[in-house]
Image (spheres, helix red, strand yellow):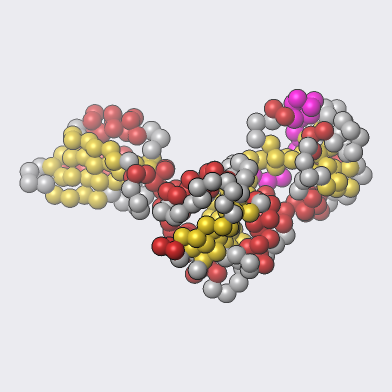
Amino acid sequence: MLRIAVPNKGSLSDATVDMLREAGYRTRREAKELVVTDADNDVEFFYLRPRDIAVYVGSGTVDAGVTGRDLLLDSGSNAVEVMSLGFGRSTFRYAGRPGHVATVEDIAGKRVATSYAGLVRADLERRGVSAAVVRLDGAVETAITLGVADCIADVVETGTTLRNQGLEVFGEPILRSEAVLIRGDRPGEAVAVEVLQRRLAGVITARTYVMLDYDCPRELVEKACELTPGLESPTVSPLQDEAWVAVRAMVPRVGRNRLMDELYDLGARAILVTDIAACRL
């Protein structure tokens, strides 16, 4: 039975559960459930702290899990990223008071407060900057005000919290993070998570694309296919009227209305859009 770690709370939790549900897996019904067995799919889900998931996966306690890329890299575990999942995006950056620290080089000899000590130490070492890293479990934004640090390194989503503390970001981003599927770096691990990976990829495709069917004059099919190239190539089928063909292609969900207008202008007819997110892939 495949053992999968799922974030039990935080910004990644609900989105992960929704994606697993769309992929056809059984998920927990209430927050108190810590272990859910899905016998039909031969899977067992363990709801764990997001920060601990990479450690469990890297040690082989569970086979796979969903966590943030920042948490994975900060953990230093042997887990490896399998695929990005398209949600939970954030940027990890340095921040400080305007006029005090303006570049990463200015951090040299100073104190940096962060909840991601491993990630920050690795970044400073890569840049050749020597500084003291102060690890905090939370409320990093107040570290400068309280005199614990000279600057901070933290996850930035909108930047509102930083601005409220009189801070601004500086330097290039340390990391661009998002939710990722991870597995252990051991023989056979890649094969073990193939079904899970394929199902999650199907959900991402269904969320990103819609299926477009339309009839097109045969003489214009080449131009029509340029408008709707699909993921690989569109399917073109003959119709009873030899002057027309039927075309089927997956197209991006965003911008589909503009695309339909262009097809109508080209001379296409009987255009039908199917939401493949409502179907199991």
Q: Residue at x 66, y 40 (%)?
A: 91
Magenta stretch: dominant secondary structure: strand
Residue 78 sits above or below residue 279 on the image: below
Q: Residue at x 49, y 52 (%)?
A: 27
Residue 228 can be seen in this image: no
Q: Residue at x 63, y 54 (%)?
A: 48
Left-right relation of 106 to 159: right
Q: Residue at x 40, y 35 (%)?
A: 254
Q: Is residue 164 magenta?
A: yes
256, 64: nearer the viewer: 64
Residue 242 horizontal/vertical position (percent) = 8, 46
Residue 162 horizontal/vertical position (percent) = 75, 30
Left-right relation of 268 to 57: left
Dividing the picture into quarters, in which one does residue 269 lie? top left
Q: Is residue 82 magenta?
A: no
Residue 13 horizontal/vertical position (percent) = 58, 46
> Which stretch did the figure color magenta?
162-176
Residue 59 horizontal/vertical position (percent) = 67, 67
Residue 175 can be seen in this image: yes
* Count of numbered circles in the view: 0
131, 17: nearer the viewer: 17
Left-right relation of 21 to 271: right
Residue 281 sits above or below residue 176 on the image: below
**Extreme-bottom residue of the structure:** 187
Residue 169 sits above or below residue 108 on the image: above
